[in-house]
Image: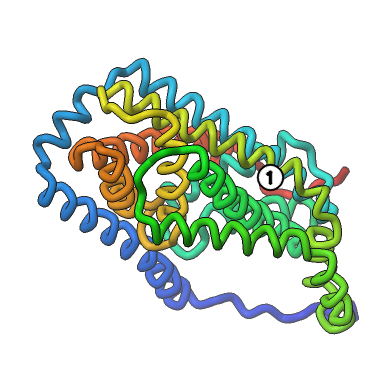
């Protein structure tokens, strides 16, 4: 009988589901709490009133321009993801990748639990195309290549900038950049080593190999990542101008990428508190006062949070179904 061939699925008890949901909220609560505590400590130690006074001087025009440019950068990032998804065999149109990318942005802001924006967009594109492994690989590649390009951008900016940053930090950035370049160039060699495991883990190896075998195909994604980083630096340069913070664009070219690397660590919600602490050290080395450095970090956090709200429309209107094309 047909019915006997179907697997029996026992629905999860409502009490177990509620427990699972409560457990999934804890990472969100802990990261939010850690961020708020970090910001509270920074405000207390560096003069909360002075920091808020600096923020109050932000000019709406510069703030709006920074938010608009930030959104433009996210559109560019969605196209980078589309290029990397094509290498894994994903055939959806750019507008689908764009929609799911903004869904991920919104998810990062407001949905508690272990499933962040990256997992959300992987789930959406995976369900749409019926290729969950390829979708996950495309998101991991997008995040990994973006982070690698960020380190290279930071290393190049350090060579151009005259910012007096800690020597240990500069040398560590150079070392990581060199190691990343070696890994990028030797990708085809690693791919040949992995091919032997194709029979044991065909799905995993099959979606990873395209990114290792064809380094040249990844170059456009790297270039887009560099353009994105330059736009993020410009955003924060504009925010600084709006508050009257005296820091050069060349100095920010070196400082912002390093702060972004620190903020990318999954310690707090969207790097809240971590980024401000990094600015305190890095901008302080460039001669910016502590209160102004923290104010710039908080202004940038506010701009990205506001920009993330743009994902509300696709989040609530997207039909999560498999493509029939």
Q: Is residue 107 visible?
A: yes
Task: Identify the image quadrant of residue 315.
Answer: top right
Check disc 1: other Cα within 10 Å, few if <14, some if 14-19, many if 20+.
Answer: many
For this view, does 47 lie left or right of residue 215? left
* Location of residue 318 in the rendering, given as x and y in whole percent from the top left corner: 63, 40
Q: Please give left or right for residue 92 compared with residue 12 in the image.
A: right
Q: Secondary structure at mark 1?
A: helix
The residue located at (73%, 59%) in the rendering is: 184
According to the image, label 1 marks what residue?
A: 222
Q: Is residue 198 left or right of residue 292?
A: right
Specify the quadrant that holds the C terminus. top right
Colour pattern of the rendering: rainbow
The N terminus: image quadrant: bottom right
Q: Nearer the viewer, residue 18 or 123?
A: 123
Give the residue at x 30% y 36%. Answer: 296
Image height check: is 285 above or below 6? above
Question: What is the count of numbered marks?
Answer: 1
On the image, the x and y values in percent for residue 106 come to 49, 43
Residue at horizontal 57%, vertical 33%?
A: 73
Q: Nearer the viewer, residue 175 or 146?
A: 175
Residue ranking furthest to the top: 61
Residue displayed at 75% across by 64% down: 133
Query: Residue 116: x percent and y percent?
Result: 51, 57
- The residue closer to the viewer here, 262 or 164, is 164
Residue 3 percent location from the top left of the image: 83, 78
Residue 207 in view here: no
């Amino acid at each position: 009988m047909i019915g006997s061939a179907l697997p029996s699925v026992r629905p999860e008890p409502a009490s177990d589901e509620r427990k699972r949901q409560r457990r999934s909220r804890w990472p969100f609560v802990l990261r939010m709490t850690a961020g708020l505590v970090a910001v509270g400590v920074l405000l207390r130690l560096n003069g909360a009133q002075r920091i808020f006074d600096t923020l109050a001087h932000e000019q709406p025009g510069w703030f709006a321009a920074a938010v608009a440019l930030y959104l433009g950068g996210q559109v560019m990032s969605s196209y980078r993801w589309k290029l990397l998804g094509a290498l894994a065999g994903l055939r959806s149109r750019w507008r689908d990748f764009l929609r799911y990318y903004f869904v991920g942005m919104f998810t990062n802001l407001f949905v508690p639990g272990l499933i962040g924006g990256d997992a959300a967009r992987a789930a959406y594109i995976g369900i749409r195309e019926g290729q969950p492994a390829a979708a996950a690989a495309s998101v991991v590649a997008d995040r990994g290549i973006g982070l690698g390009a960020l380190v290279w951008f930071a290393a190049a900016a350090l060579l151009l900038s005259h910012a007096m940053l800690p020597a240990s930090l500069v040398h560590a950035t150079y070392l990581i950049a060199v190691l990343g370049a070696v890994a990028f160039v030797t990708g085809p060699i690693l791919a040949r080593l992995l091919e032997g495991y194709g029979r044991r883990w065909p799905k995993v190896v099959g979606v990873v190999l395209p990114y290792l075998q064809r380094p040249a195909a990844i170059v456009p994604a790297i270039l887009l990542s560099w353009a994105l980083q330059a736009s993020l630096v410009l955003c924060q340069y504009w925010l600084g101008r709006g508050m009257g913070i005296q820091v050069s664009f060349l100095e920010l070219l070196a400082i912002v990428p390093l702060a972004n690397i620190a903020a990318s660590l999954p310690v707090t919600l969207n790097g809240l508190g971590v980024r401000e602490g990094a600015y305190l050290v890095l901008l302080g080395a460039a001669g910016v006062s502590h209160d102004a450095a923290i104010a710039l970090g908080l202004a940038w956090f506010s701009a990205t949070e506001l920009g993330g709200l743009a994902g509300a429309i696709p989040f609530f209107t997207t039909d999560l179904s498999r493509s029939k094309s």
